[in-house]
Amino acid sequence: MEQTTLERLRAAGTATLATQLFDRGLRSVVLDGVRPLGGAVSFAGPARTLRYVPAREDVSVHERISEPGYPQRAAVESIGPGEVLVIDARRDLRTATLGEIIVARLAARGAAAVVTDGAVRDAAGIAAQDLPVFAGSASPGIHLAFHHAADLDVVIGCGGVQVRPGDVLVGDADGVVCVPGGLVEEIAEPAAEQTRLEEFVHEQVRAGAPLVGTYPPSDEMREQYERWRNE
Amino acid sequence: MEQTTLERLRAAGTATLATQLFDRGLRSVVLDGVRPLGGAVSFAGPARTLRYVPAREDVSVHERISEPGYPQRAAVESIGPGEVLVIDARRDLRTATLGEIIVARLAARGAAAVVTDGAVRDAAGIAAQDLPVFAGSASPGIHLAFHHAADLDVVIGCGGVQVRPGDVLVGDADGVVCVPGGLVEEIAEPAAEQTRLEEFVHEQVRAGAPLVGTYPPSDEMREQYERWRNE
Amino acid sequence: MEQTTLERLRAAGTATLATQLFDRGLRSVVLDGVRPLGGAVSFAGPARTLRYVPAREDVSVHERISEPGYPQRAAVESIGPGEVLVIDARRDLRTATLGEIIVARLAARGAAAVVTDGAVRDAAGIAAQDLPVFAGSASPGIHLAFHHAADLDVVIGCGGVQVRPGDVLVGDADGVVCVPGGLVEEIAEPAAEQTRLEEFVHEQVRAGAPLVGTYPPSDEMREQYERWRNE
Amino acid sequence: MEQTTLERLRAAGTATLATQLFDRGLRSVVLDGVRPLGGAVSFAGPARTLRYVPAREDVSVHERISEPGYPQRAAVESIGPGEVLVIDARRDLRTATLGEIIVARLAARGAAAVVTDGAVRDAAGIAAQDLPVFAGSASPGIHLAFHHAADLDVVIGCGGVQVRPGDVLVGDADGVVCVPGGLVEEIAEPAAEQTRLEEFVHEQVRAGAPLVGTYPPSDEMREQYERWRNE
Amino acid sequence: MEQTTLERLRAAGTATLATQLFDRGLRSVVLDGVRPLGGAVSFAGPARTLRYVPAREDVSVHERISEPGYPQRAAVESIGPGEVLVIDARRDLRTATLGEIIVARLAARGAAAVVTDGAVRDAAGIAAQDLPVFAGSASPGIHLAFHHAADLDVVIGCGGVQVRPGDVLVGDADGVVCVPGGLVEEIAEPAAEQTRLEEFVHEQVRAGAPLVGTYPPSDEMREQYERWRNE
Amino acid sequence: MEQTTLERLRAAGTATLATQLFDRGLRSVVLDGVRPLGGAVSFAGPARTLRYVPAREDVSVHERISEPGYPQRAAVESIGPGEVLVIDARRDLRTATLGEIIVARLAARGAAAVVTDGAVRDAAGIAAQDLPVFAGSASPGIHLAFHHAADLDVVIGCGGVQVRPGDVLVGDADGVVCVPGGLVEEIAEPAAEQTRLEEFVHEQVRAGAPLVGTYPPSDEMREQYERWRNE
C-alpha cells in the first residue's frame, strides 16, 4: 500500500469515504460509538487486529500480562510503522482495554493510531500524547476485569463493523471508517475528487445557492465546478 | 408567535422551562440523548419536523437525494427564518442524518437551529458554523446507509418526546425542551419570573443559606426576594 | 479515616486503585458511565449515599421538595466536610438528579464531590463551580419527572457498582472508583508505590524500552527502579 | 385491606386496572419486562418489598445466606399470608434472584405471589408449583454472583415502576400492575364495572359492531349495556 | 395482487423469503423482535401501516379514542379483507398498542394479521382468537400511557425495517418478513422452488448426506433433485 | 473426559453447577440470554467453538457457503459425537445463525447440543427434532445478512461468557453454564452431592421447615440429611 494512497484517504476524510463505499454497495463500514479522545488528529493506516473476549475469573488474572505471548502484549510489540492497532472489545465499556504506557509504546514503534470499541484508561495522559486514539469511552479499570485478549491478526468486529487484517482504517473528528483492502486503490482518486467537488458546493451554498441543482450538482453546476477546479 | 416571547423562553433556559411544564403535568418534554455540538449556543424557535425511517436497500439509494421532493431536501428548502429543523431519526446513531453543507444551507435560510436524535457528520465543520446544532453524536456515514427521509411537517418523536409542528423547541447547554404550542404564551412570564427567583436563591445559597426555607423559598424568603427584585 | 490516606488515594488515581483492588479479587469497583463534568478535578472522600427510585405521578410532585425530610434535601443538609454525595439514579438519564443550586449548597457545606449515575442540570453553571461533579450526562428536566428520592445512608448501586456508606470514592479524568471501607488503609501505600513504579516504567517506555521486561518489570528492571526511586 | 377488594382487583385484571389508573393520572404503574413463569395464574395482594444492589466480591459471598438477618432470608421468613414478595433486581438478568426452595418456603407461608424484575432459577421446578411467579427471565446463576440483598420493606423500583410497601400488586397473563395503596378502595368498583362494560362491548364487536359508537360506547350503546347488565 | 401469489409466499415461509430477498441485495427485511403470540399461524397480506409517536401528557388523553378520526380507530375501521395492520411503535414495550376488542374488530373486518413492534394487552384473549397477532411482548397498559397514534398509510419503520404501504408482510413461527411490493411477483416462483429444493436437501441430510455437495447442492445433487421433484 | 462425568454434570443441572463454580470464585459462567428452544432437553458435552463477526456487504455473500472451508460448514462437518457446537454471535438477534438443515446434520453427526447467543431459523422444524438447541431467539433471516463465520476452535464469548475449546457446556430449562475444562473432574462429585442435599432440603421446606437452619442446613439438619441419604 503506497503512502500517497493512504495520505489521499486521510485527506479525503471519513464522511467522503463512507459515501464512496456506500456508492459501491457498502453500508456497514462506519465504526459505531468510536470517538476521538482529546484533540481529534486524523489518520489512515492498515489494520492490525486484536481480539478480546469476556474475562473469566480462572484465567483472566494479573499474571497473564507477564507472558510475552499474551496477545495484548504481542500485538503491541509486533506493530509496524504506520499501522493501526484496532481492538474488538465487544463495545463493553465497563473497564479499559489499554492505558497510557501501552500507547506510549505504540507511539515509540511508529503506530499510526489506536482504535478500540472499548474504553481506555489514563485518558488525560493519552490525550497529552501525539498518537491518535479513538475509543468508546474512558474508564479506569484494568482490562482483565472484564476483558481477556484472545488473539491477533484475525478478522474481528469493531464498533459493529467487520475489520479484516489488511483493511485500511481512516479516522477524523467524525469517527472511523473501515476501507476494505481491495477497495483502497479504487476509491482513493474518486474520494479526492468528491472532496474537491464538495468544497466547491459548500462554497456555492454558503453564497446562497439552493440545494436543488447544487447538491448534488446539476450538469450546469458541474460545468462551473470544472472551471473552478481548473483554476 | 412573537419574537419577544421566544426570546423570553430562550433566556429562561431549558431547566426552568422543564420545571414550568412539569408543574402543568408535563413530564415528557425533555429530548433524551440530544446534546449540543461544539460550543452550546442557546436558541428558541418553532419546530419544523422531518421524519426518517429505517433505510432499505431497494429504495434508500444515492439517487434519492437528486429528487427535489425528497423530504430531507424539501425540508431544508422550505425552512423559514427563526424555525428549528427537528429530525426524528429513531435515536439510531450508526450513520449521520445530515452534514455541513445542509447546515450551511439552513443557516443561509435563517434557521434558528437543528435538532436531531440521530448523528451528524462533518462535525468539525458544523461546530465552526454559527448555527446551533444539537444531535445524539457524530458519525461519518451518509444518511441513506441506515436512514431514509419519509415526510415533513408531521407529528414526530425526537429523543423519546412527541414534537408537533408549531411546538417551540428551546435549547442550551443542558439539552433541548419541547414547549407545546398551546403553552408557549402561558409559561413565558412564569418562566422569566422563576429564573429571577432562582438567581436570587442561588445568591443566598452561595452566601451560606440552607436549602430549607430558601429553595423552595419560605414566605419570609419570598418577601426578601420581592425587595431584591424591585431593586 | 485520616486525611493523608485520602490524599494518597487521590494522588494514586483511579487506574492505579482499580488495579490494586483487582489484585485483591475485586473486579466490580469501577462506576460505569459516570464521567467528570467540565474540567476534571480529582477527589477522594467517604461516600454519603442517596437513593432514587422511579417517579410515580401520585407521589412524585413538586410539593415533595418543600418537605425538610425529603431525602434529597436531607442528604444535602447533612453532608459533612470532605464527604462525597453519591446518588443511585438507576442510570436513568431522562431527567436530572440535581442542579446548580444544590451543588452550590454542597460546596458551601464543604463536600468533596458529587457522583451520580443519572444526569445533572444547569451543567454550564455547575462546570463553572469548583466542586467536582461526576454524572452520566446533562439533562434539563426536574428530578421528579422520572426520579424520586427514597432514602439516604443505605447501601446503593451506582454505575453498576455496590457502594456502602463508609466506602471511599475516588475520581479523576478516567472516572470514579469505589474503594471498600475496609481496604482503604491496606491499599494506600501499595497504590502510591505502584504509581511511582509506573512513572518509572512510563519513562523507560517513552525512551524506547519494549513492554516485555519493562511492564510488568523484570527483576533487573525492578532493581533499576529501586535505584531510580532512591534518587 | 379487605379480601373482597383484592378479589375484585384480581378479577378485573391488569389491563382494566391500568386503564383506571391512567384515568387518574397514573401512567407509570405497569411493571416493564415482568412476565408470568409457566402457566399464568392471576393474583392480587399487598407488596412486601425486597431490594437488591449489585454484588461486590468482598461482601457478596456464600456465607451471607447463612446469616438469619440477611434480607433475602429475612424477607421470606417474615412474609404473611396473601402477601406478594416483590424484588428490585435492577432488571439485571445475568443471574437468578431466587430458586425453587425459596419459592416452596414462600408457598408454605401462604404468600400470594412472587414478582421480580430479575431472573429466577429452577424454572421448571417453580413452574410445577402453584405459587404464581412473575420474573424477567430464567437463569441458573446463584443470586450472589451479580446481586446482593440490601434491605426490605422500603420503597423500591421494580420493572421501572415505583412500588411502596402497602401498594397492591395484581398480575395475570398480561403482566403486573402496581395499584397505589391509597387508590385500592377507590378503583375496585369502577374497575369491576369497566370489566362488565368491556365484556358487553367485546360481544357487540364480535357480532359485527364497528368501533365508533361501541368502543368507547355512545350514549345509546351505554343504554343497551345498562339493559344487558340488568339481565 | 393475486391471492395465489400471496398464498405462495405464505407457503414458502419467512426463512425462504428472507433468503430470496438477500439474493436480490436486501438484508434489511426481517422485523427484529416481533414474535407470534400464542399458536403461530402463518399469514401473507398487503401492509396497512399505522404510526405511533411517544405519548405527551397534554394530548395523549383518554378522550382521544372517542374521536372517529383518531388514527388507531380509523386504521381499524378502514382495514380491508386480507390486509395486515402493521404498527410502528418504536419497539417501546412499556405499554400495549392494542387489545382484544380491537383484534376482534379486525378479525370481523377480515384482516389477515396484526403486526406490531410494541406490546399487546389481553394477551390470553388474543391468543384464543384466530387472527394471527405478532408483537414484541404483552403488557397490560393502555396505549395512551406511552404511545399516541399519529397517522396511517404512510411509510413506517417496524422492528427496525422500513415498511411501505403496498409491501407484503409474511409471518410464521420464525417471525415476520417484509416483501417490497415491487418484488412480490418476482420472488413468488423462485421462493416456491427453493422450498421444494430445501425439502429434498433436508431429506438427504437426514439420511446422512454431508453438507458439502448437498447444501448448497452440487450439480450432481441438483440432478437428483430434478428427478425427485418430477416424481 | 469420561462419559460418566458428563452424565453427572448433566444430572446435577445448571443451577447446582453455577453454585459450585461460584464457590470456587467463578461468577462469569452463566450464558446470558440463551434459552432452550422448544422442549428443554438437558445436555452436557465438550465445547466446539464457532465465531461469527458482523457481516460486510463485499464479503458476506451467498457464495460463501459453497466453500467447504467456510467456518460455519467446516464446524458442522468436523463435530464429533457428544460435542456441543457453541456459536459466538455477539448476541445480535437480527438474523439467524443457522437453520433446521444444519441442525439435522449436527444430529446425524451425533452432536450433543447447539448453543448460540444469536437466533435460529426454522424454529418450528428445529423444535421438532431431538437435538437440544439453545438460542437467543428465532428469526427467519439468513445468517449472512448480519453475521459472517470467521473461524472455529478458538476461545470465544457466548452470552457474555468466555468459552474455551475443551470447556464443558451444560444446559437445561434454566439455560446454559460453562464449566471450565480444568474444573470438570473437581466439581462432578460435589455437584452431585449438592443436588442430593438440596433434594432433602426441598423436602424439608415443603414439609414446613423454615429457611434458617435448613437452607443452608445447620449441623443438626446436616446429620438428618446424612441419615436420609444413607437410607
Image (cartoon, coloured by chain):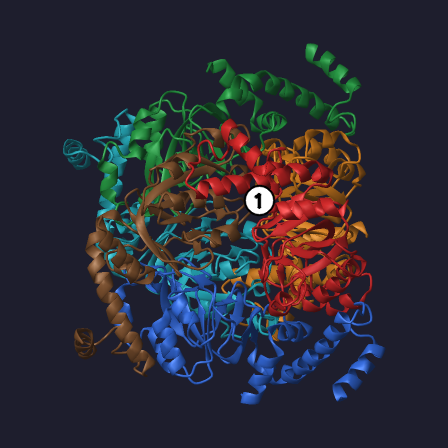
Chain colours: A orange, B cyan, C green, D brown, E blue, F red
How many neighbours does mark 1 have within 10 angstroms: few (below 14), some (14-19), or many (20 or more)?
Answer: many
Residue E67 falls left or right of residue C43: left
Q: Which is nearer the eye, A195 or C25? A: C25
Quadrant showing the N terminus of chain F: top right
Kindly give the residue lying farthest to the front in the view shown.
F231
**Could you say where residue D133 lies in the image, as x and y percent from the top left?**
43, 51
Q: Chain of mark 1?
A: F
Q: Mark 1: which secondary structure? A: helix
Which residue is painted at 71% across and 60% down in the image? F148
Q: Which is nearer the eye, C30 or D111? A: D111
> As displayed, is residue B163 above or below residue F211?
below
Q: Which is nearer the eye, B36 or F52? A: F52
Task: Decide if residue A95 is in sight here.
Answer: no
Q: Which residue is mark 1?
A: F15
**Image quarter of residue E97:** bottom left
Which residue is painted at 20% across and 53% down in the image? D185
Kindly give the residue lying farthest to the top in the view shown.
C230
Quadrant showing the C terminus of chain F: top right
Disc 1 marks a residue whose amino acid type is Ala
Q: Which is nearer the eye, F210 or E166? A: F210
**Image quarter of residue E50:** bottom left
**Could you say where residue C78 lies in the image, as x and y percent from the top left?**
31, 25
**Image quarter of residue F113:** bottom right
**Could you say where residue B43 lies in the image, as x and y percent from the top left?**
37, 51
**Could you say where residue A135 lies in the image, as x and y percent from the top left?**
61, 43
Task: Decide if residue E145 is in sight here.
Answer: yes
Residue B214 falls left or right of residue B138: left
